[in-house]
Image (spheres, helix red, strand yellow):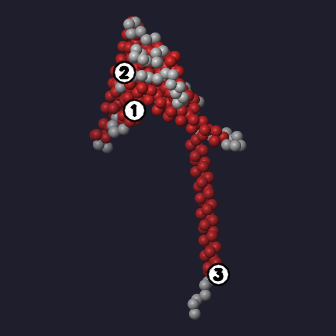
Amino acid sequence: MSTTDTAVSRRQVWLAAYTARTSGLLSTLALVYLVTYSIQSIWHDPGAPWYFWLDLFGKFLWVLFAVDLAFRYLMTSPKKRFFRKNWLDTITVLIPQLRSLRALRAFTGGGIISTKGFLSGGAITSGIVAVLLIVWVGGLMVLNAERGAPGAQITTFGDSTWWGFETITTVGYGDFVPVTMQGRFFAVLVMFVGISVLGVVSATFASTLVKKGSDGAPVPESPQQHILDQLAELKSMVSALEARIDGASSITTISATENPLPKNP
């Protein structure tokens, strides 16, 4: 192994150890930021001392997340797909207005409230929590964007929450509509992300009902084992067909041997 390969391997080991130690902490800070962001958005009072300190804390977390992203990028090799793989962290660092989305990290693979941890009930439970989180964060972002704008219709937390549920479920009564460009941009994000999550939840629920079958058979505990069982069944069917083909070929050969064709005179 060359010196370069040794250095790369060493960096990967350091990165893995760093990620294992900081993932839970950063996830917790992201959840804490969601709480502080919610307080600032619902009880908006820029002149209050507590608002100043919460805003300063949010900016400090943004710097911390930016340093974390830069460090992991420098340590990663190869770097070609780094930003695509860490798209959520990248967006929240490059666009500070979207840093509230950082709270989603608490619900992703390494988060403290991930599908491997607290949300162990399955994809449907995780999807429901994701929908509620999108409505909450999306509503707060739109509320902040619309606050103080001329002709704004979304001016309270109740209005933004109602608008979020209308939007994510594609109902769209039209009683509350964003009037600013930033608010409409956030609305488009809620639409796309919300429809995607609802689609996943609906597909998972439908798949669960289909797997139960008409006889009420329970759903297999392991999807991987279910696929392996189907592959084994297909393999046995192929083996049976091969045996039939071999048997038919043997009969044809014996018949040709016992009854040879007459030679031409």
Question: Residue 175: x, y in percent?
Answer: 51, 22
- Which residue does the image show at 37% across and 29% down from the upper left? 90
Mark 3, residue position = 258
The kind of residue tagged 2 is Trp
Q: Residues within 10 Å of mark 3 (few under 14, many from 20)?
A: few
Say which mark, if any, is on residue 87.
1
Looking at this rendering, what residue extends furthest in the left direction? 3
Q: Looking at the image, is 249 positioned above or below residue 1? A: below
**Is 184 located above or below residue 5 in the figure?**
above
Which amino acid, mark 3?
Glu
Q: Earlier in the sequence, mark 3 or mark 2?
A: 2
The mark closer to the camera, 3 or 2, is: 2
- Asked whether 83 or 183 is in front, the reply is 183
Circle 2 — which element? helix
- Label 2 sits on residue: 62
Q: Nearer the viewer, residue 197 or 66?
A: 197
Q: Quadrant of residue 223?
A: top right
Q: Could you tell me residue 80's position as x and y percent?
A: 34, 39
| Residue ID at (58%, 89%) | 263
For the residue pair 9 and 60, the one nearer the viewer reads as 60
